Amino acid sequence: MKTIKSYNPSSKSAPYSFEGDIYKNDKIIRVGAAKHYRRIENTHQLKACLRAGEYAWPGGYQLFFYTSDGGILCYEAVLDNLVSVFDSIKTDCDDGWKIIGLGCTNELDGPVYCDHTGSEIS
């Protein structure tokens, strides 16, 4: 399985420019390859959120994922358990790994903690 990494804009070795869509020789190859989706309904949208990175722009607020049972997961927890997350989304299983949305830390009043790692999402 390939590791999903967020795009590094300082990397000059990439054969395409990257601003949400993938272009090659001024032709769009993939639309919405790196985009933050508020509602996540399939694995393609989840992968696009992971590629877009864990910070919102502008503002630099950290993002996190909502699960179907009301839990909160940080990017690290999702990447570490990606097989379980994909399986839960594909089979529509409410086992605590089914991600249904993306949230931002500036929307909440208090601190936010990941339900899997216990780390604070700031």
Image (cartoon, grey):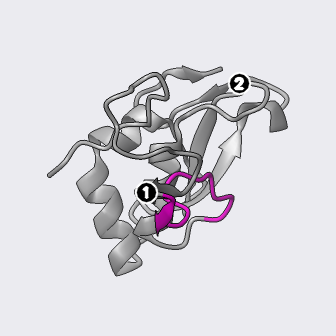
Q: Nearer the viewer, mark 2 or mark 1?
A: 1
In this figure, what is the number of numbered marks? 2
Three-letter residue code for mark 1: Asn
Three-letter residue code for mark 2: Gly
Q: At 46% from the left edge and 22% from the top edge, which residue is drawn?
A: 10
Q: In x, y percent, where is residue 101? A: 62, 58
Magenta stretch in the rendered image: 26-39
Q: At 32% from the left edge and 63% from the top edge, which residue is drawn?
A: 86
* Numbered tag placed on residue 25 in the rendering: 1
Q: In x, y percent, where is residue 77? A: 38, 37
The picture quadrant where one finds residue 121 is: top right
Q: Main secondary structure of the magenta part?
A: loop
Question: Around disc 2, counting alpha carbons within 10 Å, would you say few (fewer than 14), some (14 to 19), or many (20 or more)?
Answer: few
Question: Around disc 1, counting alpha carbons within 10 Å, would you say few (fewer than 14), some (14 to 19), or many (20 or more)?
Answer: few
Q: Nearer the viewer, residue 69 or 37?
A: 37
Q: In x, y percent, where is residue 75? A: 46, 37
* Numbered tag placed on residue 60 in the rendering: 2
Q: Is residue 33 magenta?
A: yes
Q: Is residue 114 above or below residue 100?
A: above
Q: Nearer the viewer, residue 38 or 59?
A: 59
* Numbered tag placed on residue 109 in the rendering: none
